[in-house]
Image (cartoon, rainbow, N blue to C red):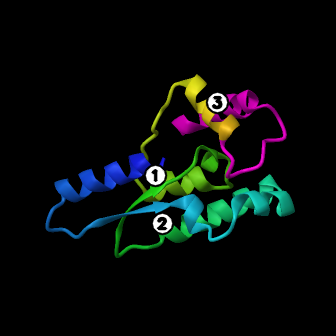
C-alpha cells in the first residue's frame, strides 16, 4: 500500500505544481505502536477503534494535502468509511483476490485473524464499494 501511496503523492504533486506538496501518511505507521503487540494485548476490536481514531486525526489536518494509505481492514474500523466518504476522495486499489488473500496470509506485521483469511476477505469485499 505504501508504494502505491508514494506513486499517488508523486502524481498529486505533478498535477498540482505550485499548490504545495502532498505527503504520504501510512495509517499503520501513524498509529505509533507495534500493531501485532497491540492486537495480542487488546484484541482486534480495540485495534480497529484506534485505527478509526488515527484516521480521523489524519483527516483533521486541513493545512496539508495528504494521501492516506489505509490497510484493507479500515473498512471494519467503526465509522471509518463514513468519515472517508465525507472527508476524502477514496480510491480502492483493487488487487486480484488470490493475491490479496496470499498477502494477508503472509503479513507478519499483524497476528493471524481468528478466522480464515478467505472469510475475512469475503466479509470485507462488499464494504470496499461503500
Near-viewer residue (84 or 64): 64
Q: Nearer the N terminus, badge 2 or badge 1?
A: 1
Is the residue marked by circle 2 packed among few (<14), some (14-19), or many (20+) residues within 10 Å? some
Label 1 to label 3: alpha-carbon separation: 18 Å
Q: Marks 2 and 1: CB-CB under 8 Å?
A: no
Q: Is residue 106 left or right of residue 58?
A: right
Dividing the picture into quarters, in which one does residue 115 lie? Answer: top right
Q: Nearer the viewer, mark 3 or mark 2?
A: 3
Image x and y of residue 113, in percent = 79, 41
Image x and y of residue 117, in percent = 73, 32
Q: Nearer the N terminus, badge 1 or badge 3?
A: 1
**Residue 11 in sight here:** yes
Label 3 to label 2: alpha-carbon separation: 28 Å
Q: Residue at x 69, y 64 (%)?
A: 34
What span is in magenta? 107-130
Label 2 to label 1: alpha-carbon separation: 18 Å
Label 3, secondary structure: give it. Answer: helix
Is the residue marked by circle 1 packed among few (<14), some (14-19), or many (20+) residues within 10 Å? some
Q: Residue furthest left?
A: 18
Q: Nearer the N terminus, badge 3 or badge 2?
A: 2
Near-viewer residue (50 or 114): 114
Q: Is residue 118 left or right of residue 75?
A: right
Find residue 59 and name its label.
2
**Residue 125 in sight here:** no
Q: Which residue is mark 1?
A: 2
Q: Is residue 95 left or right of residue 75?
A: left
Find residue 101 and name its label.
3
Q: Residue at x 48, y 72 (%)?
A: 60
Amino acid at each position: 500500500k505504501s508504494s502505491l501511496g508514494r506513486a499517488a503523492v508523486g502524481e498529486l504533486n505533478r498535477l498540482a505544481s505550485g499548490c504545495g506538496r502532498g505527503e504520504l501518511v501510512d495509517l499503520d505507521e501513524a498509529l505509533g505502536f507495534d500493531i501485532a503487540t497491540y492486537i495480542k494485548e487488546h484484541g482486534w476490536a480495540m485495534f480497529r477503534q484506534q485505527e478509526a481514531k488515527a484516521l480521523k486525526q489524519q483527516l483533521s489536518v486541513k493545512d496539508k494535502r495528504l494521501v492516506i494509505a489505509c490497510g484493507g481492514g479500515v473498512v471494519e474500523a467503526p465509522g471509518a468509511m463514513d468519515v472517508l466518504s465525507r472527508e476524502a476522495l477514496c480510491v480502492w486499489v483493487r488487487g486480484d483476490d488470490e493475491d490479496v488473500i496470499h498477502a494477508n496470509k503472509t503479513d507478519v506485521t499483524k497476528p493471524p485473524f481468528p478466522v480464515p483469511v478467505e472469510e475475512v476477505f469475503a466479509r470485507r469485499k462488499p464494504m470496499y464499494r461503500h
